Image (cartoon, coloured by chain):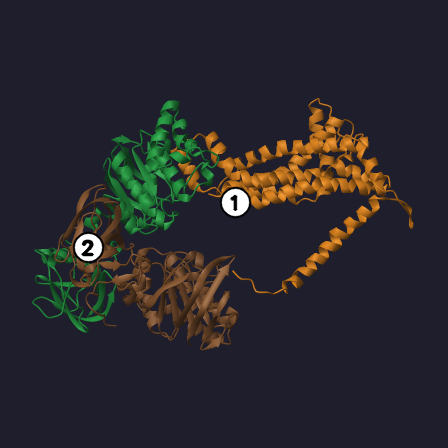
Chain colours: A brown, B green, C orange
């Protein structure tokens, strides 16, 4: 099956939720919709599912126009951010519920339910009701319900957002494995760049109902076409600073001066916006990170195995990401080191003009 | 300003506890230093909220004593303990203004009116609530309400400690950051003892000077965030802190090395000796950050097959298999990952051995 | 989100519309019809315009009935609401006591209304009734068939016994919905029991108490069966309330015209109260949620 959206737009009460989006989704590929809250991810998924009808534009399945065809007549399964299960059904009945409407015999249903329960590791819980399950187990049940249908389109709308990070870690790995083995079109919405990167596949960057960029996930990450994409596809958002290229050097902010080496070499003089991801700033000097500037610590946060140090430099608020767990005092002065080879350069209009060469090359898959 | 001590405290919610499984909190001896910021971290049901409520006096422990500044307060009601508490869901008095909410604990204690006014204004200033003082508290957003709850603790001059029970649960993700920062600021400015219960690792490590990790009613380790990360003293701590968690591999000891899946791995000075002495079930642990992935064989390296390399932008997570075991290795983004075979280096200073779950030191 | 263009849903609503039409709208139209005619017999009726309305509005007995009605409803609220709240506060929070007290409270609510009247006739009788004999035994003359005050006391007692449990149940439900954290926070803030009631329990019960007030006001305003059975509106007219008077007018005096006019006026008084009630119900739960 292939799914195609042609210039779809939805307006609700004068407000545009989806603004002229065209997309082509092919089977056996994972498509990641990445964008902040209210970017239109859910609206777009509802269009794909047939839960909503676009105001203008067409939805095609295998070349056939299905715009306005009810969701019940399509082969779609969906998993939501909230753990949605029937509260009065056991886990078994919850999973079986989507099969009961088909022509399958009870025996076949039983086989399928047990098989998917084993994949999702909820086979010991089949007799329980949702209220007796932890959040992670509830979401596993909801995912199992979606998987068991073997729908040709599987939509997951931030399925891990409400889980705590250890559970998210586990389920993310399992989902990856599951998606690999399917001939389904999988669409996965997330706000988190790390989740998108881990899932890989193809990414569609959305913001305010518009498609900003699409392409292989890692490529989009390495070459964000605009400041907006760079911000959405970086966590924390990319550090930005205004500057200019003049007299053969790059001048960033008040007192950062860099020579025009490497990818900065071909830039013509003029004003630019320079961007650098938090991971490419450091509070320790190392080969590569040799441009030093002073800053004060605003706040330091630990996330997973990294420490995010929010700093102030001049008027700008930046974030530095360090591996490992460290602590800093509020207001503490520190030196920050910058790797010039890792700078993104955007034109005044926000368009990308130079990106650092991707490090480390491709990955075996 | 006070020192809080828990002496042989234990608590069971059932009237006549039989075995240890009846105890929500197993025997705990703990000193909470004056002016420090503590986090009580653990999965739900680990006994962290019970511990908190024992300190505030909402629960009277079935065993043991609670001392504040060497004074036994075990039998005292919460209002007589000079301890404030902020709950998971913001508790505000709906019918009162923000000012009256903040003044409430002082009025109940018959504090002088002028004193109340100056204290409330001082705290409101600190929490950025001054503009809202005259508003009714019921119409405010969850984060402001939670600041008010916090303010009712701060407003009391005599307060020995402020306790937090998962206070950011109902706060919007993008506002959590601001509130955490506010808490840090308050801690620096007022240097009150803060004890913060959470199941969120990031919140605990961000907030606290000292993190107390609990599981199944027991304290497994207390330490600075960095200590917990670099030197977990229990395999649960290794798993629970850090993402991905620590690699844990069943092993046995042979000579001065640990044998994992037939491969010898060198250990630090004397570890093998003590590990053998400790006995029990031995597990080797090392964090993905500390493993080194090499393209070619070197002395002491362990050959592994590469299953998957995920480029996460800032770094790569490489999944490798060693015999039947699967390990995660974190490598810099610019490091080439070999396609099929690679060699793992285990730096001895980061390679830990656990006997029956506990670190061999 | 877009709604599909589909009008089939109207078919599902049709039966209900029909029932409402038959049970409410058509009778109402007939009442309007009757209120503007003088009916002498079958097929013999004269259009009289607003004459009945004028007569009813200037009827002194009606004014008296309305005054008594308002006094009665006012007293009902003044007694039942605080009493109901007090009972709810005193009820056990957990354990077997909860179900026992709930069952005991619910008992008066499940007895048919005319039976209640009968029970109280017997209960208050000065010769054999438990209450009547007891009070008279104390040397107080008590006979609700003879003295207006005694009749009022009896009717009020019956009403309070019958309906306070409803208020108590509503208030109890409101109290149980308050999260524990509020009580814990109050203990830590050093609040007194009164402060807890004043600043936590009462505000959190506001929604259900609003419902209780309106329910009790409406019900007592329309009350008929129990006082009619107990006192028959007497002695004299001392316990004749609006609906008692209406029935006397329509059945006792066979005056359908004035009775119909009276009904419409009664209806117009009750209608705005219904609207207030409806609004209050809509707002319950939105106003005082955390």
Rendering quarter of residue C87 = top right
Q: Position of residue B258 (x, y in %)?
A: 13, 63
- Asked whether residue B338 appears in the rendered view, the answer is yes
Residue closer to the observer: B244 or B334: B334
Residue B290 vertical position relative to residue B85 in the rendered view, above or below:
below
- Chain for mark 2? A
Mark 1 lies on a secondary structure that is loop
The residue at which mark 1 appears reads as C286
Q: How far, Cα to Cα, is label 2 from label 1?
A: 60 Å
Q: Position of residue B153 (x, y in %)?
A: 35, 34
Q: Residues within 10 Å of mark 1 (few under 14, many from 20)?
A: few
User: Residue C208 vs residue B245: left or right?
Assistant: right
Residue closer to the observer: C238 or C207: C207
Residue displayed at 62% across by 32% down: C79
Residue closer to the observer: A334 or C204: A334
The residue at which mark 2 appears reads as A246
Residue displayed at 70% across by 32% down: C70
User: Residue C152 vs residue B78: left or right?
Assistant: right
Of the residues tagged 2 and 1, which is closer to the observer? 2
Label at residue A141: none
Q: Position of residue A242 (x, y in %)?
A: 25, 52
């Amino acid at each position: 099956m292939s799914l195609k959206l042609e210039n779809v737009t939805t307006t609700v009460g004068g407000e545009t939720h989806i603004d002229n989006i065209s997309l082509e989704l092919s089977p056996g590929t994972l498509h990641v919709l990445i964008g902040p809250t209210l970017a239109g991810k859910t609206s777009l998924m509802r269009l794909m599912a047939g839960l909503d009808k676009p105001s203008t534009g067409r939805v095609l399945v295998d070349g056939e126009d299905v715009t306005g065809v009810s969701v019940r007549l399509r082969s779609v399964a969906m998993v939501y951010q909230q753990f949605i299960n029937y509260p009065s059904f056991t886990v078994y009945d919850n999973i079986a519920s989507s099969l009961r409407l088909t022509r399958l015999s009870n025996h076949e249903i039983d086989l399928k339910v047990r098989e998917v329960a084993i994949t999702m590791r909820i086979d010991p819980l089949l007799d329980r009701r949702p209220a007796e399950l932890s959040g992670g187990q509830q979401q596993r049940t909801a995912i199992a319900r979606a998987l068991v249908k073997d729908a040709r389109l599987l939509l997951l709308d931030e399925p891990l957002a409400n889980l705590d990070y250890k559970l998210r870690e586990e389920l993310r790995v399992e989902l990856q494995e599951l998606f690999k083995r399917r001939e389904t079109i999988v669409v996965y919405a997330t706000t988190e760049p790390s989740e998108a990167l881990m899932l890989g596949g193809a990414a569609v960057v959305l913001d305010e109902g518009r498609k900003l960029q699409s392409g292989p996930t890692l490529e989009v990450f390495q070459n964000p076409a605009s400041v907006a994409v760079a911000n959405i596809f970086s966590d924390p958002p990319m550090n930005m600073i205004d500057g200019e290229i003049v007299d053969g050097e790059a001048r960033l902010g008040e007192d950062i001066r860099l020579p025009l080496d490497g990818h900065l070499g071909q830039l013509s003089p003029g004003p630019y916006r320079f961007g650098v991801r938090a991971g490419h700033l450091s509070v320790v000097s190392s080969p590569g990170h040799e441009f030093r500037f002073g800053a004060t610590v605003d706040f330091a946060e630990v996330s997973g195995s990294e420490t995010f140090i929010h700093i102030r430099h001049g008027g700008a608020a930046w974030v530095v990401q360090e591996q490992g767990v460290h602590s800093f005092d509020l207001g503490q002065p520190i030196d920050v080191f910058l790797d010039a080879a890792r700078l993104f350069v955007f034109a005044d209009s926000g368009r990308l003009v130079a990106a650092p060469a991707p490090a480390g090359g491709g990955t075996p898959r | 300003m006070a020192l809080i001590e828990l002496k042989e405290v234990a608590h069971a919610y059932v009237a006549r506890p039989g075995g240890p499984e009846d105890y929500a909190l197993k025997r705990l001896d703990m000193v909470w230093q004056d002016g420090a910021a503590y986090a009580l971290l653990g999965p739900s049901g680990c006994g962290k909220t019970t511990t908190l409520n024992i300190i505030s006096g909402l629960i009277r422990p079935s065993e043991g004593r609670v001392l504040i500044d060497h004074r036994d307060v075990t039998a005292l009601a919460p209002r007589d303990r000079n301890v404030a508490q902020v709950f998971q869901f913001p508790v505000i008095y709906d019918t009162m203004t923000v000012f009256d909410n903040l003044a409430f604990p002082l009025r109940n204690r018959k504090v002088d009116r002028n004193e109340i006014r100056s204290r409330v204004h001082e705290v409101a200033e600190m929490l950025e609530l001054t503009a809202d003082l005259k508003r009714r508290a019921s119409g405010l957003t969850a984060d402001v309400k939670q600041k008010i709850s916090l303010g009712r603790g701060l407003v009391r001059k005599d307060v020995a400690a402020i306790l937090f029970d998962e206070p950011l649960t109902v706060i919007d993700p993008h506002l959590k950051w601001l509130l955490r920062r506010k808490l840090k600021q308050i801690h620096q400015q007022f240097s009150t003892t803060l004890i913060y219960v959470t199941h969120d690792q990031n919140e605990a490590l961000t907030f606290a000077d000292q993190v107390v990790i609990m599981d199944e009613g027991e304290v497994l380790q207390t330490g600075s965030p960095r200590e917990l990360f670099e030197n977990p003293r229990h395999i649960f701590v290794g798993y629970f802190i850090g993402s991905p968690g620590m690699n844990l591999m069943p092993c046995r000891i042979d000579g001065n090395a640990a044998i994992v899946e037939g491969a010898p791995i060198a250990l630090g000075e004397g570890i093998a000796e003590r590990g053998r002495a400790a006995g029990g079930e031995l597990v080797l642990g090392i964090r993905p950050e500390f493993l080194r992935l090499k393209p070619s064989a070197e002395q002491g390296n362990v050959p592994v097959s590469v299953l998957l390399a995920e480029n996460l932008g800032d770094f790569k997570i490489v999944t490798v298999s060693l015999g039947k075991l699967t390990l995660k290795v974190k490598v810099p983004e610019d490091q080439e990952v070999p396609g099929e075979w690679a060699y793992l280096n285990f730096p001895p200073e980061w390679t830990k051995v656990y006997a029956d779950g506990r670190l061999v030191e | 989100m877009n709604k599909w263009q589909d009008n089939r849903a109207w078919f599902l609503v049709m039966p209900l519309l029909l029932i409402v039409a038959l049970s409410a709208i058509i009778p109402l139209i007939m009442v309007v019809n009757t209120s503007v005619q003088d009916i002498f017999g079958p097929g013999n009726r004269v259009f009289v315009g607003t004459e009945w309305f004028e007569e009813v509005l200037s009827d002194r007995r009606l004014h008296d009935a309305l005054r008594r009605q308002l006094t009665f409803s006012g007293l009902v609220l003044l007694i039942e609401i605080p009493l109901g709240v007090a009972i709810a506060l005193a009820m056990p929070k957990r354990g077997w006591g909860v179900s026992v007290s709930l069952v005991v409270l619910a008992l008066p609510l499940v007895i048919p209304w005319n039976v209640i009247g009968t029970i109280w006739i017997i209960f208050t009788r000065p010769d054999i009734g438990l209450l009547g004999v007891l009070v008279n035994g104390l040397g107080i003359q008590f006979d609700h068939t003879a003295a207006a005050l005694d009749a009022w006391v009896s009717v009020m007692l019956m009403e309070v016994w019958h309906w306070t449990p409803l208020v108590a149940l509503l208030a109890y439900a409101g109290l149980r919905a308050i999260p524990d954290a509020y009580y814990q926070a109050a203990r830590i803030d050093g609040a007194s029991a009164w402060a807890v009631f004043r600043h936590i329990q009462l505000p959190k019960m506001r929604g259900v108490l609003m419902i209780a007030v309106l329910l009790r006001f409406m019900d007592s305003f329309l009350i008929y069966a129990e006082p009619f059975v107990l006192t028959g509106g007497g002695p004299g007219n001392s316990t004749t309330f609006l609906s008692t008077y209406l029935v006397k007018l329509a059945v006792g005096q066979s005056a359908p015209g004035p009775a119909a006019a009276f009904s419409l006026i009664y209806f117009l008084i009750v209608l705005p109260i219904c609207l207030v009630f409806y609004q209050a119900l809509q707002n319950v739960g939105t106003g005082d949620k955390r």
